Amino acid sequence: MAITHVQRMRVQWVDTDGSGLIHYTAALRYFEVAEHALVRQLFEGSSAPPFMLPRVHVEADYRAPLRYPDEFDCTARIAAVGTSSVTYAYEIRRIDGPLCIVGKIVAAAIDMDGRKIPLPDDARALFTSAL
């Protein structure tokens, strides 16, 4: 059974451009808030070795508008686990129903010195368990 995290949020004025619609970069921050909560949930109590997961690919499709002060849910889940990467998938849906944004972020494992590495076995197992 796939593990997801749903984060309830509200569009803040600072997230908008002059039209009152969200600036396209706001979606990436919303994705990251939900992702961080998902990863905390997966790794809670884990002793996985230290490594980092910088983004190597980001995409978002904007399907319906989000405006100040819309309330919405951002859902994050693990979509794929590779040898050295993890792919997160996202959906942002306004509380009144419309699917507004879908996205994907791919993050690649690096060690603490910045060198690409395979995902540590413990981390791979945790990510894979969420599929």
Image: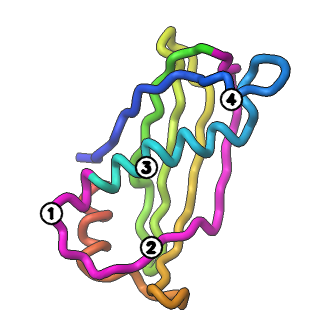
Measuring 46% from the left and 44% from the top, which residue is drawn there?
Answer: 33
Q: Residues within 10 Å of mark 1 (few under 14, many from 20)?
A: few
Q: Nearer the viewer, residue 48 or 14?
A: 14
The residue that label 4 is drawn on is: 14
**Tag 1: residue type?**
Gly
Q: Give me the residue at 29% from left, 54% from top.
A: 40
Whichever of labels 3 and 4 marks the residue nearer the N terminus, that label is 4
Which residue of the protein is positioned furthest toward the right in this rendering? 18
> Mark 3 or mark 1, which is nearer the start of the sequence?
3
Which residue is under mark 2?
82
Mark 4: amino acid: Val
Cα gap from disc 1 to disc 3, whole angstroms: 17 Å
Dot placed on the residue nearer the N-terminal end, 1 or 2: 1
Q: Which residue is mark 3?
A: 35
Mark 4 Cα-neighbour bin, 10 Å: few <14, some 14–19, many ≥20: few
Q: Which residue is mark 1?
A: 45
Residue at mark 3 to residue at mark 2: CA–CA distance: 17 Å
Residue drawn at x 55%, y 69% as measured from the top left: 54
| Residue 113, horizontal then vertical, whole percent | 50, 90
| Mark 4 residue element | helix
Establish if 36 lies above or below 113. above
The residue mark sitting in front, 1 or 2, is 1
Q: Secondary structure at mark 1?
A: loop
**Discs 3/2, front:** 3
